[in-house]
Image (cartoon, rainbow, N blue to C red):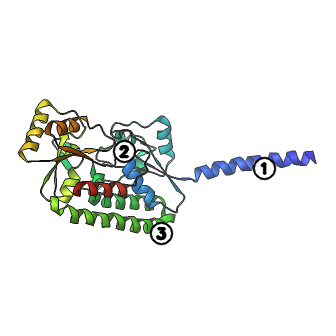
Amino acid sequence: MKFKKVLFSLFILPLLFVTSCTNKGNEKSVITSFYAVNEFTKELVKDTNINVSCLVNGLVEPHEYEPTAKQVTNMTNANLVILNGLDFEEFSKNLESNDKIKDKILYASKDIEPIKIDSNIDPHTFVSLKEALIMVTNIKNGLINAFDEDTEIIEKNYDNYYNRLNELNNRFEKELLKLKDSTIIVGHEAFNYFGRDYNINAKPLLGLHEEEPSAKALTDIKKYIQDNNITKIYGEHFEENESIEKVAKDCNISVSYLYTCEMMNNSNLSYIECQEENLKTLIK
């Protein structure tokens, strides 16, 4: 009897090992770069067995992030790697030179008309709902190409999520008409697509890379605020706002805060919830 048990164990263990390895090899895996792109992707793969993970989590700056060795390995094993593009992720050039990763990369911002700031391209497309609609469509197409067996579910999720985003975008267009052609002072140069799409001039205190403003820039922005009777300026949730808070104090005006959807704390707000809060803040 013991002999039979030993034989059974010797027979079944290799099978368990093979089965375990096979399941691991058949996992459907998508890796996203940061909060906004991760949010879009998760919404589109609901009710599938596609696993989505994010490279940059918590209150970590995505621009300067460098993936760990383990994350790079995970990307080589993933079916799809979804990035914002337009050089938002500085590490993307390293991924493009990796033969095991480069053909899996999907840039969610492709086909969006870029905004140039001096010699740089503004990559903050996701701040605007109009651009988010394009990004979600690009992600949907990439997911279907990678997981054609899940096409029906992905398309259904896409229709639902696209309609929700578009409904909110329509609300933005309607509500922000009262701010048309006006100027708002914002933290750093992340609101250009938002400004273009909703006819608002978003005047930044800091540049694209959030470099500290010069003394002249501070003087100029204070003069602009005083000359134009501006009573409120906008910082950003989860960002350093020392400069903008100092300007507000010096000019005796108030500060409100907007979500750029680059980072998120543990409050688990969705992208749509963040944008709804932005709208409430802007139309107060």
Q: Which residue is drawn at 44% across and 61% down?
A: 44
Mark 1–mark 3 Cα distance, whole angstroms, equals 38 Å
Residue 168: x %, y % from top left: 30, 64
Question: Is 116 situated left or right of 100 in this image?
Answer: left
- Observer-nearest of 241 and 43: 241
Mark 2–mark 1 Cα distance, whole angstroms, equals 47 Å
Q: Upstream in the sequence, badge 1 or badge 3?
A: 1
Residue 93: x %, y % from top left: 34, 40
For label 2, count other residues whose C-alpha is less than 10 Å away and answer few (under 14), some (14-19) or many (20+). some
| Residue at numbered disc 2 | 263
Q: Upstream in the sequence, badge 2 or badge 1?
A: 1
Query: Disc 2 marks which amino acid?
Result: Met
Q: Which residue is drawn at 7% across and 47% down?
A: 228
Secondary structure of the residue carrying tag 1 is helix
Mark 3–mark 2 Cα distance, whole angstroms, equals 31 Å
Residue 12 circle label: 1
Q: Which residue is drawn at 46% across and 35% down?
A: 68
Q: Quadrant of the C terminus?
A: bottom left
Residue 188: x %, y % from top left: 23, 42
Frontmost of labels 2 and 1 is 2
Query: Disc 1 marks which amino acid?
Result: Ile
Secondary structure of the residue carrying tag 3 is helix
Placement of 131 over or under 65, stated as above or below? below
| Residue at numbered disc 3 | 152
Q: Upstream in the sequence, badge 3 or badge 2?
A: 3
Residue 49: x %, y % from top left: 54, 58
Residue at the limit of the structure toward the right, as seen here? 1
Frontmost of labels 3 and 2 is 2
For label 1, count other residues whose C-alpha is less than 10 Å away and answer few (under 14), some (14-19) or many (20+). few
